[in-house]
Amino acid sequence: GVLKNWEWYDDPKRILFSMSRYKFVSKMFAGRRNVLEVGCGDGFNAPVVRQTVQNLTIADFDPVFIEDARSRMRDRWPYEAIVVDVMKDEFPGVYDGIYSLDMLEHIPQKDEDMVLQKMVRALSDDVHEQGAALMTQLTHLGHRTDNYTHDWVPALSASGTREDNAMTYVGER
């Protein structure tokens, strides 16, 4: 995919970190009927999750990534790839599992609750009764650069206070 090709060039280990997180998601959501990924990028790892769920929808705000994901999809592990801008759009559909890896840290802090509320609203009623199946992961594991500037950084601290990039990694104070 477009994004994974860049990762392979920039930091090949990042692909392994990414795939291991998708394997974890696939185990946590195994057997679910309708699952949504928010912020899928090029959707390269979608088949890993699709192997264990009945229906998978992947969403990203970038139409270039979504078109790339659609072009690489194969009949064995089909999924739906849609363009959704979490800052403007609601999610089309109801899901019994939603996950997001490396997306929430790109949202301005003042809009994080709004985006999470949209995700919660897209969960089916039976999921709300059983306990939500909503997973987010907030770090750019294995990749640090100096381009994390302006109004976001690659991680949130446990206190909810955004910290400088160097402060998000243990031992770098």
Image (cartoon, rainbow, N blue to C red):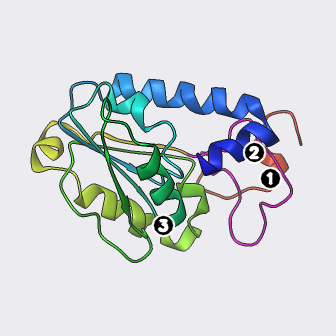
As drawn, 14 above or below 117? above
The quarter holding residue 116 reads bottom left
Q: Is residue 134 magenta?
A: no
Image mark for residue 168: 2
Is there a contact, CB below 8 Å, between mark 2 and mark 1?
Answer: yes
- Residue 21 percent across, percent down from the top left: 53, 30
Q: Amino acid at mark 1?
A: Asn
Q: CA distance from mark 1 to mark 3?
A: 29 Å
Label 3 packing within 10 angstroms: few (<14), some (14-19), many (20+):
some
Q: CA distance from mark 3 to mark 2?
A: 31 Å
Q: Is residue 156 magenta?
A: yes
Q: Amino acid at mark 3?
A: Pro
Q: Nearer the viewer, mark 3 or mark 2?
A: 3
Magenta span of residues? 138-158
Query: Quick one: 27 or 169, which is closer to the camera?
Result: 27
Is 60 situated left or right of 146 in this image? left
Which element type, helix, strand or loop, lies under badge 1?
helix
Quadrant position of the N terminus in the picture: top right
Which element type, helix, strand or loop, lies under badge 2?
helix
Q: Which residue is mark 1?
A: 165
The quarter holding residue 74 reads top left
In the image, what residue occupies the spot 68% across and 58% down? 162
In the rendered image, the residue lying farthest to the right is 173
In the rendered image, the residue lying farthest to the bottom is 88
Q: Which residue is mark 3?
A: 63
In the image, what residue occupies the spot 73% across and 37% down? 8
In the image, what residue occupies the spot 21% across and 25% down? 31
